[in-house]
Image (spheres, rainbow, N blue to C red):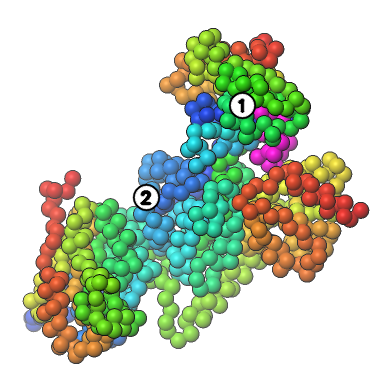
Amino acid sequence: MSALAAPPSKRLLKGNEAICLGAVAAGCRHYYGYPITPQNDIPEYMAAHLPALGGTFLQAESEVATINMMLGTSASGKRVMTSSSGPGISLMQEGLSYMAGSELPAVIVNISRSGPGLGGIAPSQGDYFQAVKGGGHGGYRLIVLAPHSVQEMYALTMLAFDLADKYRTPAMILGDAIVGQMKEPFVASPYDPASTVEKPWALTGCAGRERLNVKSLHLKDNEIEVHNWRLHEKYERIRKDETRAEPYMLDGATIAIVAFGTAARVGKTAIQWARKEGIAAGMLRPITLFPFPRREVFELARKVDVLLVIEMNTGQMVEDVRQSTPLHDRIAFLGKPCAMPTPEEILERIRLLAGRKV
Amino acid sequence: MSAPPGKARFSKAVYARPRSLVDVKSHFCPGCHHGTIHKIVAECIDRYGLREKTIGVACVGCSVFLYDYIDVDVVESPHGRAPAVATGVKRAQPDKFVFTYQGDGDLAAIGTSEIIHAANRGENLSVIFVNNTTYGMTGGQMAPTTMLGQKTSTTPYGRDFRGDGYPIRMAELLAGLEGTAYSARVAVSTPAQIRKSKEAVRKAFEMQINGMGLSIVEFLSTCPTNWGMKPLDAQKRVLGEMSEYFPLGVFKERVQADFA
Amino acid sequence: MTGDIIMAGFGGQGILMIGNLLALTAMEEGKHVTYFPAYGVEMRGGTANCTVVVSDEEIGSPVVGRPKGLLIMNGPSMERFLPMLAPGGDLIINSSLVEERQVTRNDIRLLSVPADDIARNRIGSRQMASMVALGAYVALSGIVKLSTVFDCLPKVISKKYEKFIPLNVNALKEGAALAGFHA
């Protein structure tokens, strides 16, 4: 194999498998889930590997049971993960609301597919609203991370565990069938947690201490109002400290794409082509969807002629873009519900927008 | 293991509050059985010295207030999901003692999927199931265990099997599953019944201690407030028509020999 | 060297296997590469296809609208994918199963490879048809070195089937020879 140039640590890996490697590297030993396309590689990997690591893989009777098993394991102080797709994630919304209310960390992977309803298995970004606006009842937020490469599926899964623990809240990886199913060269970087988090709230039996409860019910006086303000304050801290976005070829850009995940991936090709044609295109790629990079969009909107928002839906994140800047006449939108935009059609739109400015 | 009560040297204590029962005034309605059942659970936790290694799972309904009365760690679950939550706790901490405390709406209506599959997997858990034939906390609506002809706020003309179906016998149903180690139905309307029910809870807890699988004890219980009865009349109803339809007894008891 | 290709055929013809092998080879040569297979219900109908993108630069889209290469192993795939092939692109067809008259475009470069016949008659195993086709594509496009493909075979063939590696090498060489390349 001496003729081969790639280092031995490099391997061709599927996005869904990268998520599993990231979870295992981050110390996750508990996985619960229910089969659904296009994410079955994840439970299959976990079923094969977690038992040997002393962990638990359990195929639950439903996603409703799944999320509640996660609630129990998380309340025990252990890192826990599930993966699913739209219809299954919908069934988990009840449990997610309880976990957010009970302030329990967990990582939920949504390899999203088309909807509404049974929809289809084509890649889609139609779950954006559900992921970033709460999804379940009562007013809460999930931390939502949107990987756009196999390497990032790995890295953001590790980050999701860290952020979930740090803020005691569920975190979601919002992917789609493309980033889930594609293979790319991948190198497993070591897990390097920003900080280790103690869990004094974990229910481990009350030996040597007062009994503890993990709960979301608050009936006394103004307890629930106080609880809501406390959660709000937490979400504001997350907004302030955890917003992440990748600027891509933004130097001198007059047209800036705003896109996440697979749509951003395709957009990068279109930008490379546009630059070769002399059109100054670039991109701001939100990596965290909640917290949304509001300030970055605000600043960018002042500098460029056009923000071209591209989504694999009929327009969801574009509402957050509009909320981030008063310069609404600079916002253009390209939507491909339940289909991938091709680099060709994005380039065409870029040309059109550039031409309009000439 | 904490010492059982009643070991004083010169005078014989005949009664003491179980260590695992919190010393607070009960908020439950007069004639409600939750307090009695809590005490039985607390006594059995004490008996096996489990208090410091127990995680209880509370459900939704009047049962949720478990954590105000039992002096152990408690996690609250969404409505009906306690067996799934308990599965998550037990899988993460197999060395701990885990029990759920669920009402009839919780276990026998919205949570049927979770209890059946937890039992079928033989999850090593204990389930305390309180059947009072109504939704107490929400104001006395029809439960899956509401008796035929029973008037509730959502069966104002009485439960009619032609539209509402039949009261469901969970202890028997769960006894039919391979993973269930122990299933019994008890009542607490007489001192003798209380003694027998404590025996059942002990058996259920021993099943978990011995790693035998899921154990469930169904308690026939009262809800005088929503039944519109005086407490004593409520006891009579349990001893009468409820016990006729929901027979007391042990429906399954696994012995070591048949546990592969 | 930059290139992209869609490969398509029946399930069981080894489409995903050769796509994966090509991607692995490109990676081993230090190139950027993506491999995207068809998945889920799309595969239940018995068809298989995948897209491989190889580049010296960071790859944006792993899926292409106008591929520069197209490898067609059966008739039904021709109808679906031929319109997508970029003008001037390379079309490799398995002429054992696909008739040349199905090629309704003349703005592309066609290479007919009787892959099943070669595999059966000259390699001794019809299962080697996809390897014959891959050899032809690699030689025609020059997207990776044929010798690197040989080197990568042990990485995609399990120990159990190790003894078939020489057959695979022969199949790749036969295909490459059809493209005028002699290893």
Instruction: Point out residue B201 in the picture as x, y percentages from the top left corner.
Output: 17, 67
Q: Answer left or right for B248 relative to B212.
A: left
Q: Which residue is mark 1?
A: C72
Could you say which is closer to the camera, residue C151 or residue B109?
A: B109
Q: Residue at x 47, y 18 (%)?
A: C162
| Mark 1: few/some/many CA within 10 Å (<14, 14-19, 20+) | many
Marked residue chain, label 1? C
Instruction: Point out residue B102 in the picture as x, y percentages from the top left corner.
Output: 28, 70
Secondary element under disc 1, as helix, strand or loop, is strand
Residue A74, numbered label: none
Q: Is residue C56 magenta?
A: yes
Instruction: Point out residue B160 in the picture as x, y percentages from the top left corner.
Output: 24, 76
Position of the N terminus of chain A by quadrant: top right
Could you say which is closer to the camera, residue B155 or residue A102?
A: B155
Q: How many marks?
A: 2
Secondary element under disc 2, as helix, strand or loop, is strand
Q: Is residue C144 magenta?
A: no
Could you say which is closer to the camera, residue C171 or residue B57?
A: C171
Looking at the picture, do discs 1 and 2 lie on one chain?
Answer: no
Q: Residue at x 12, y 74 (%)?
A: B243
Marked residue chain, label 2? A
Q: Amino acid at mark 1?
A: Ile
Q: Does residue A173 appear anywhere in the picture?
A: no
- Give the magenta-colored segment's residue range: C51-72
Q: Which residue is mark 2?
A: A58
Q: Is residue C35 above or below residue A239?
A: above
Q: Amino acid at mark 2?
A: Leu
Q: Residue at x 66, y 58 (%)?
A: A314
Q: Answer left or right for C129 relative to B157.
A: right
Q: Is residue B111 above or below residue B136?
A: above
